[in-house]
Image (tube, rainbow, N blue to C red):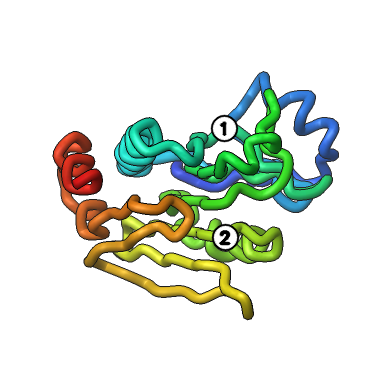
Amino acid sequence: MQVELEPPFLLIKPGISEEEFYRTVGEDGDWEYLGGRLVLSPASDRHEDLFSFLMTLLRTFLDARGGAVVRGSRYPMRLDPRWSPEPDLMVVRDEHRHRLMPQRLEGPADFVIEIASEGDPGFDLREKLPRYEEAGVEEIWWINPFTRTLLARNRTATGYAGQTLAAGRLASQVVPGFWIEVSWLWQEKLPSSFDCLRQILG
């Protein structure tokens, strides 16, 4: 019996080698390589809205202040031969720019942002967050627009410390001076990036 699936849904193709992934990634860049599997998580309109908003804030802030670069999704972060996730956003400090290769980042980013997908909102939290922490990513923000919460995890001398916010100012530890008001993310119409940047830059 053939079962019809209603989108959005998560697609997983197991048993794929790293060589296969990097051979085909240029042809279909929507797939991630997670634990030896190809994973496709469709992005919703809201997901893309939040991605564009945060990318604009981070890129413009770093253009003004320097110290790091930001990359968007579809640029793999190779952690080992079985893991090349593609975070929605990642920040790489200037001292780690040598990790930026034409096709991928070799090693962990300093700061990663993931936005929950409609297909499986908890997937990144279950599958990717533990691997990011294992790799030593210094700062991780996981944004869930469905519960209107943001989980922030920061590496400490003894492990990771986290907080979950629905509102209030959240300052980055990796990007000095960069912060957001978390409630911005839940507005039906996202606020003006220009107005938010004026507040962030002071």
**Relative image position of residue 44 (x, y in whole percent):** 38, 40
Disc 2 target residue: 138
**Disc number lying in front (2 or 1):** 2
**Relative image position of residue 107 (x, y in whole percent):** 71, 46
**Label 2 to label 1, Cα distance in Å?**
21 Å
**Quick check: can you spot residue 45?**
no
In depth, the one of 167 and 109 nearer the eye is 109
Q: Which labelled disc corresponds to residue 152?
A: none
**Relative image position of residue 185 (x, y in whole percent):** 26, 52
Tell me which amino acid carries mark 2: Glu
Q: Is residue 86 left or right of residue 195?
A: right
Residue positioned 17% across, 51% down in the render: 187
Q: Does residue 79 lie above or below 65 as drawn?
A: below
Q: Residues within 10 Å of mark 2 (few under 14, many from 20)?
A: some
Q: Which labelled disc corresponds to residue 74?
A: 1
Q: Quadrant of residue 63?
A: top left
Residue positioned 76% across, 29% down in the render: 22
SS assignment at label 1: loop
